[in-house]
Amino acid sequence: VYQRDGHPNADLLAAKCRELHGAERAAITSTGMAALSVPLLALLKSEDHVILGSRLYGKTQVLFRDEGARLGIQVSIVDTCDLAATKAALKPQTKLLVAETIANPLLQVADIAALAEIAHAGGAKLLVDNTFASPVICRPLDLGADLVMESLTKTLNGHSDVILGLICGKEELWGRIGPVISAWGFSSSPFDCWLASRGICTAHMRIERGSHHALVAAEFLRTHPQVSEVFYPGLKDHPNHALATKQFSADLFGTMVSFTLRGGRPAADAFIRGAKDIPFCPSLGELSTTLSHPETTSHRGMTPEQRVALGITGGTIRLSVGTESAKFITEALARGLVAVV
């Protein structure tokens, strides 16, 4: 058979991911965006309605809002952390609600159980992007989600050397998923699947260590005079800390930390130049600690007004905390902050 119809490396990787997520079915796709495209093409038709979280990854919004519109699919964009607004956005033709476990870049936490209840009461399904959390920290299917996707490119693989996606969920939704992956060419590379199977073997160690050191980094940053705000669900003053404590596993809150520098864009530029031991990388979830600048990377397609509405400024920095020692990470941050005047 053709590779696009399936191959043993993808089957083995899917089996591992299915076990990690407690899913009935799982499939590996060529990219994270392919994993998001699968439910759009498999489950939706013209005149169906989708509710999208306003903090979703930009290309996710482009996929459903722009490409979906070409197929006659209607979209409403709401803050899915606002449960009343989410419920109010439901229509009789709503078929899918899409949210992220932890939003990029300011790390708001979605109440997955409540979103699942809202979706199901309206006859819709809940699709959760769990990339920032991984199943080590959160298993959305256990909380009522119907489908979960992850960019395996990032934390689960953890070595910055593959591009893959994962879609997993309930058996009842699976009838068209395999045919869509094959017909639309969303199939995965056998070698990338082999590499990701290797990466997943160390996922628990990497994510647990990274999460512990992310909390250390967040606590270090909040004491610095050049930093106005720190965003990390593990901090007790984070607005979603109580929800994260209830929803996440074993006091782990993720490997991502974001913060805002008082000096805006000039301060961010100075920090990036000064933090020479923290590479600039728009992606995330690898062994090394990396940083990115959302205004000029992940959210560059938005207008300034849209970014301000989400709380993203020129001074916003996003960290992906890796496996180095806490001492190395805080010292690297300190060197970057010294450069900010």
Image (spheres, grey):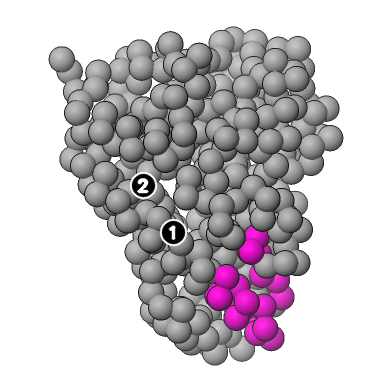
Q: Position of residue 12 (x, y in %)?
A: 25, 33
Amino acid carrying label 2: it is Thr
Q: Residue at x 21, y 33 (%)?
A: 9
Q: Which residue is mark 2?
A: 153
Q: Position of residue 127 (x, y in %)?
A: 57, 30
Q: Residue at x 56, y 76 (%)?
A: 216
Q: Residue at x 74, y 43 (%)?
A: 81
Q: Position of residue 285 (x, y in %)?
A: 41, 57
* Closer-to-camera residue (295/218): 218
Quadrant of the drawing holding the N terminus: top left
Q: Which residue is mark 1?
A: 207
Q: CA distance from mark 1 to mark 2?
A: 14 Å
Q: Residue at x 76, y 12 (%)?
A: 92
- Above or below residue 133? Residue 94 is above
Does residue 52 appear left or right of residue 44 in this picture? Answer: right
Q: Is residue 290 visible?
A: no
Q: Is residue 262 visible?
A: yes
Secondary structure at numbered mark 1? helix
Q: Is residue 281 magenta?
A: no
* Number of other residues with Cα within 10 Å of mark 1, as a class: few under 14, some 14 to 19, many 20 or more: many
Q: Position of residue 245 (x, y in %)?
A: 67, 55
* Number of other residues with Cα within 10 Å of mark 2, as a class: few under 14, some 14 to 19, many 20 or more: many
Q: Residue furthest front?
A: 250
* Closer-to-camera residue (284/158): 158
Q: Quadrant of residue 220?
A: bottom right
Quadrant of the drawing holding the C terminus: bottom right
Q: Is residue 219 magenta?
A: yes
- Which portion, as a residue range, is magenta? 215-234
Does residue 320 appear left or right of residue 179 in this picture? Answer: right
Secondary structure at numbered mark 2? loop
